[in-house]
Image (spheres, helix red, strand yellow):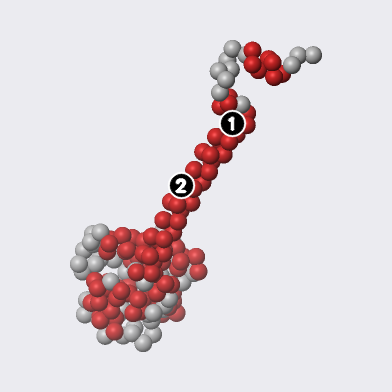
Amino acid sequence: MADPIAEHKLDPSNDGSESSSPESKRSTGRLRLGWGMLTFAVLLGLLAGIGTFTFGYGKGASYLSNNPETCVNCHVMQGHMDSWQNSSHHHVAVCNDCHLPHDFVGKWVTKADNGFFHSLAFTLQNYRDPIQIKPRNKEVAQGSCIHCHKEVVHSLLPASSQQDMQSCVHCHSDVGHAFR
């Protein structure tokens, strides 16, 4: 029976260092895995810290509410807030009632989408002043008009969903925001 230790010593590929042993390879792998995990944990911690700071500094929790005051966290919205306070809808609807869909998923998807792009635009100072509503959000506002006034507008609705309809704010432009 051959002696494994003697064969190891006689092996020409063995330069005498311990780095070729399986134990050494496992320990080097653990060391790489350890540094990789540590780097990942530090980066994840930095990301979480920066995200938490930004959420707090930007009053992120307020955007989860239904309070109209939230909309004026950005100074560019003050004119819209003032015009809403002078509108006929001031006592019956808040910003979210007109600017978000009325179904649960649609509301939160739109809130997240608008929140991300609004904060990006305001942070980078990349927006028009006065701000302009985007086509997707015009559709949401139109849907809100129809949702709340369906008993009145049902006869004005198109016969099929493929047909267009006149925008409610085309005629009623000062309902949600007076004098805009």
Query: Quick one: which residue is furthest to the right in this view?
Result: 1
Query: In the displayed structure, does residue 3 sit left or right of residue 71?
Result: right
Determine whether the residue tagged by mark 2 lies in a helix, strand or loop.
Answer: helix
Query: What percent of the width, then of the height, locates residue 52?
Result: 41, 64
Mark drawn on residue 24: 1
Query: In the displayed structure, does residue 122 sit left or right of residue 148?
Result: left
Q: Quadrant of residue 139?
A: bottom left
Query: What percent of the width, then of the height, locates residue 120?
Result: 31, 60
Q: Is residue 19 above or below residue 6?
A: below
Q: CA distance from mark 2 to mark 1?
A: 23 Å
Residue at horizontal 20%, vertical 67%? 129
Identify the residue under disc 2.
Answer: 39
- Image quadrant for the N terminus? top right
Query: What percent of the width, then of the height, locates residue 154?
Result: 43, 74
Residue at horizontal 32%, vertical 63%? 119
Say whether residue 60 is visible: yes
